[in-house]
Amino acid sequence: MDRVIIIRYGEIFLKGKNKSYFESLLINNIKHSLKKFKHEFSRSQARYVISNYDGNFEAEIIDTLKKVFGIHSLSVADRVECDWQNGFEQILQSIKRLAISLAEGNVLKNPTFRMTVKRADKHIPMRSYEIAALLADAVLKNTDFTVNLSDYDYEITVDIRENGFAYVYSEKIYGAGGLPVGCSSKGMLLLSGGIDSPVAGYMMAKRGMKQCAVHFASPPYTSERATAKVVELRDIISPYTADMPLYIVPFTEIQLEIHEKCPAEFMITIMRRFMMRIASVLAKKEGCSAIITGESLGQVASQTVESMTSTESCAELPVFRPLIAFDKDETMALAARIGTYETSIQPFEDCCTIFLPKNPSIHPNLKKVIEAENKLDIDALVARAIEAVQKR
Ligand code: ATP
Ligand code: MG
């Protein structure tokens, strides 16, 4: 007998002829995520099995797998030989152990259980429900649990596979869902130090988009600590995105130029237009086919339809805004769940918060914005910023 982790995938089931492509991406991502753990990977039809790992790292391995998109659920199981000629002796032993440990941890009054048998191996001359009845005996003998097939507190599952093994488990741990990262091209995430943009990256990774990130920093107005915070946010979300290189773009010169030469009311719009231009250049270099931001409709002056239209016109790729219809508290709840919230709320300055005009234009007129912007040597400013980019 050995202890293994069973992995089940979700939406990939619906992929028909392309299923093997999605599966190979998922398998690669699983292997990549478990790189630092000793383990063996195998598959049995639509299940993947992680075995031969160090039990001390089991919880950590499960936490890691819970961040791999495409996984629907996991179970820690006993893998035993399906010795049906000997009356399922090994399976019974495993069920007995499991039942005793469930009973020890049980706090419910009159606990009930159901035995579920799945039989992929059709050589066994018994029906699933007959095997279940036989196996349920081990639970009844070792606990005070009673059977209830429809309204049960515990479900003990025995999954008999065609490879001569059976998997015995009682718990299903839900995974991240979504699609395997890499199946939906690659995007360039505009990552600020705020709450929204890391969540936006998570959302796009959920639908299979691989990502790079770009952060605009304005030293000395923004500190090294503010950049370190962004690196930390990248590190928190990169298990979901299967890695995420981060570009740090020096933005001070551009901001000072805008501040000096353009009307204050257009400062933010023009600044964002530069962000889009620079992000587009980096995106193309990295083979990205979209830009991602954490914008949400109406949240601030720069996120009105008109503001977004005028920034978007400088992007050379489609701009995805997965949080467009999220309320702030919905985003905050998701940030807390994925573990970015505590880092995001650390109070460090962002380049958007310096030189902030008192009255930014809420509905900037694109023609006027372009007129104002033309006082700047846009191409040279963009080129200099790109030249000084750092990769982390
Ligand atoms: P966030 O919480 O993500 O900072 P926000 O609500 O503060 O968002 P803004 O500051 O208006 O909103 O930024 C809107 C979006 O623009 C961000 O979600 C992010 O995608 C991008 N952005 C803003 N500042 C930066 C920055 N310094 N570097 C990279 N992207 C940025
Ligand atoms: Mg921000």
Image (cartoon, helix red, strand yellow):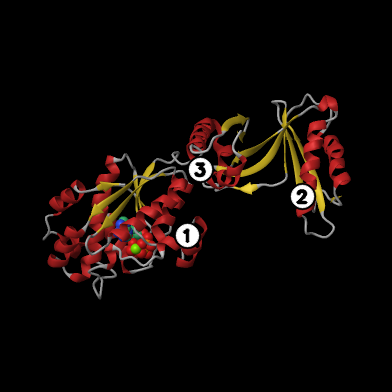
The reply to whether the C-beta atoms of the residues labelled 1 and 3 are less than 8 Å apart is no
Q: Amino acid at mark 1?
A: Ala
At a point 30% along the width and 44% down the height, the residue shown is: 283
Circle 1 residue: 335
Cα separation, mark 2 vs mark 1, equals 34 Å
The residue carrying mark 1 has its beta carbon less than 8 Å from ligand 1? no
Q: Is residue 153 something that shows in the picture? A: no
Question: How far across and down, in percent of the image, does residue 276 sit?
Answer: 27, 53
Q: Quadrant location of the N terminus?
A: top right
Numbered marks: total: 3
Sequence-wise, which precedes: disc 2 or disc 1?
Answer: 2
* Camera-nearest label, 3 or 2: 2
Question: How far across and down, in percent of the image, does residue 91 sit?
Answer: 78, 34
Q: Amino acid at mark 3?
A: Leu
Quadrant in which residue 307 is drawn: bottom left
At a point 30% along the width and 63% down the height, the residue shown is: 350
At a point 43% along the width and 41% down the height, the residue shown is: 184
Circle 2 residue: 102
Q: Is residue 1 left or right of residue 339?
A: right
Ligand 1: give its quadrant. bottom left
Kindly identify which numbered label has been placed on residue 237: none
311 and 166: which is toward the camera: 166
The residue carrying mark 3 has its beta carbon less than 8 Å from ligand 1? no
